[in-house]
């Protein structure tokens, strides 16, 4: 069986995990995209869920409620 070095920490592992986003191989500790700071995770989430930004209008919160 071939041993592979983790792309994130460089430790040798017998059972590498392949990331579904960047397709690199990682050890058990860094197998999750959040644990190895996957570079493609943010861009994929942005396209899948969209960038949600808060839209604020010029009037204040209280003036909208009380109409003043």
Image (cartoon, rainbow, N blue to C red):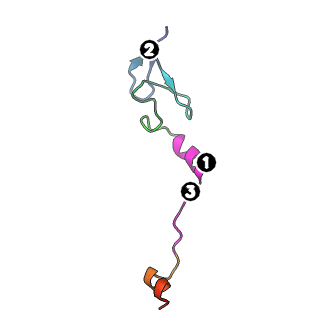
**Tag 1 near tag 3, CB within 8 Å:** no
* Magenta region, residue range: 40-56
Percent x, y for residue 44? 58, 44
The residue positioned 51% from the left and 73% from the top of the image is 56
Residue named by callout 1: 48
| Nearer to us in this view, 49 or 67 | 67
Residue count near mark 3 (Cα–Cα under 10 Å), binned few <14, some 14–19, many ≥20: few
| Lower sequence index among marks 2 and 3 | 2
Above/below status of 11 relative to 57: above
Residue count near mark 2 (Cα–Cα under 10 Å), binned few <14, some 14–19, many ≥20: few
The residue positioned 57% from the left and 50% from the top of the image is 46
The CA span between labels 2 and 1 is 33 Å
Residue named by callout 3: 51
The residue positioned 48% from the left and 36% from the top of the image is 33
The quadrant holding residue 35 is top left
Residue 35 belongs to magenta span: no
Which element is circle 3 on? loop
Residue 46 belongs to magenta span: yes
Percent x, y for residue 42? 52, 45
The quadrant holding residue 9 is top left
Residue named by callout 2: 14
Which element is circle 2 on? loop
The residue positioned 48% from the left and 84% from the top of the image is 65
């Amino acid at each position: 069986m071939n041993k592979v070095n983790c792309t994130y920490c460089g430790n040798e592992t017998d059972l590498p995990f392949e990331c579904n986003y960047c397709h690199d191989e990682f050890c058990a500790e860094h197998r999750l995209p959040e644990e190895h700071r996957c570079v493609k995770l943010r861009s994929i989430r942005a396209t899948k869920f969209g960038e949600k930004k808060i839209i604020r209008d010029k009037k204040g919160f209280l003036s909208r409620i009380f109409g003043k």
